[in-house]
Amino acid sequence: MENKNKIEESGYDRLIKCGIRPSVQRLAVMNYLMENRIHPTVDKIFNDLYPTMPTLSRTTVYNTLKLLVESGAAIMLTIDERNTRFDAETKPHTHFMCYKCGTVTDLNINPPVLKGNYIDDCEILNSELYLYGHCPECVNKNKN
Amino acid sequence: MENKNKIEESGYDRLIKCGIRPSVQRLAVMNYLMENRIHPTVDKIFNDLYPTMPTLSRTTVYNTLKLLVESGAAIMLTIDERNTRFDAETKPHTHFMCYKCGTVTDLNINPPVLKGNYIDDCEILNSELYLYGHCPECVNKNKN
DNA sequence: CTTTGTGCAAATTCTTTGCACCAAA
DNA sequence: TTTGGTGCAAAGAATTTGCACAAAG
């Protein structure tokens, strides 16, 4: 369940490939993101890692996520107004957020490929397609 | 310049159509959004209206924007990680943010029309296509 | 009068910063 | 040893809440 769409590459390999020194904390965050494709918030990551790493600090999680994003090892999502979310899948794909339960998932629909193009003289370097609505679980709940 | 893509409908008509009582403050915010299609932040709206409405409070701007979005008179954009932005154009269109200057503009490219569909059993009620890169001004600056 | 809206101040939440200590090269 | 990483506590920024007063119906 939590491992849906798990990425097979190892966190260690991903860090090295992106030129990031693999400290214990960075490895923990990177592996967490690759094994749990739930688009977690900073708090979710911290709370889930804390039991096995009681010396971990929120600051380190923030530092690490910033580094991962800047190095191309992860992406940041602004789909959720309240909290920044993170994803270890860096290839373009479409995200969905449920208005009722707040869960963010990947959708099997290709976003328009626009990177590298110029549109209205704007140089496009990145794009995100965010969809919102009701997830299957919440659609069904509604029928009761 | 500031009036690019200005909406011709009056703020008063928009409020009435959306079932919102047109208080002085609400009218000021609605008109501001319709006349200034710059996807402003709460602070920008407050600071621009304050000189002509010195009793206006940030709380009222927050209250009003929440009401406008809930009533369908405006939309909220999460394209900018730092600040929520607002737009009086509620028909689906594509937004662009410049990485360098932070300006948010509309782009003349139609986003995929997905509202009303089911994708992976998710009921799609809304969508946003956000593009990021360098705006014409910043592309040119870069050449120096 | 009764309901709705406004605006101040305080509280809350999320994130960043400064700095001392720790760890690895 | 020198550079880089971690984590605490404090600061900062954005937003929300509680409440008293004002305005509108």
Image (cartoon, coloured by chain):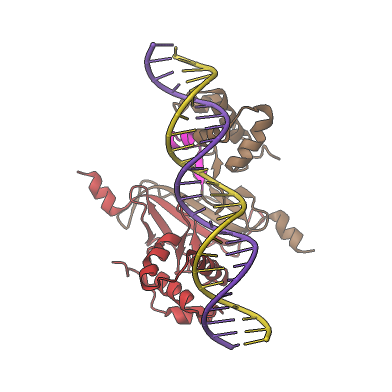
Chain colours: A red, B brown, C purple, D yellow
**Is residue B73 among what the camera can see?**
no
The picture places residue B86, in percent across and down from the top left corner, at 55, 42
Is A51 part of what is drawn in magenta? no
Q: Answer with left or right where residue B140 lies relative to residue B66.
A: right
Q: Nearer the viewer, residue A10 or A108?
A: A10
The picture places residue B67, in percent across and down from the top left corner, at 47, 33
Which image quadrant: the N terminus of chain A? bottom left
Is B71 part of what is drawn in magenta? yes
Q: Nearer the viewer, residue A67 or A38?
A: A67
**Is residue B41 among what the camera can see?**
yes
Q: Nearer the viewer, residue A68 or D4?
A: D4
Q: Is residue A46 above or below residue B106?
A: below
Q: Is residue B115 above or below residue A23?
A: above
Q: Tell me the residue at 55%/70% (across/down).
A: A67
The picture places residue B7, in percent across and down from the top left corner, at 59, 34
The picture places residue C6, in percent across and down from the top left corner, at 54, 26
Q: Answer with left or right where residue A43 lies relative to residue B81.
A: left
Q: Tell me the residue at 65%/32% (across/down).
A: B50
Q: Tell me the residue at 43%/60% (across/down).
A: A43
Q: Nearer the viewer, residue B117 or B89?
A: B89
Q: Is residue B113 above or below residue A94?
A: above
Magenta residues span B66-77
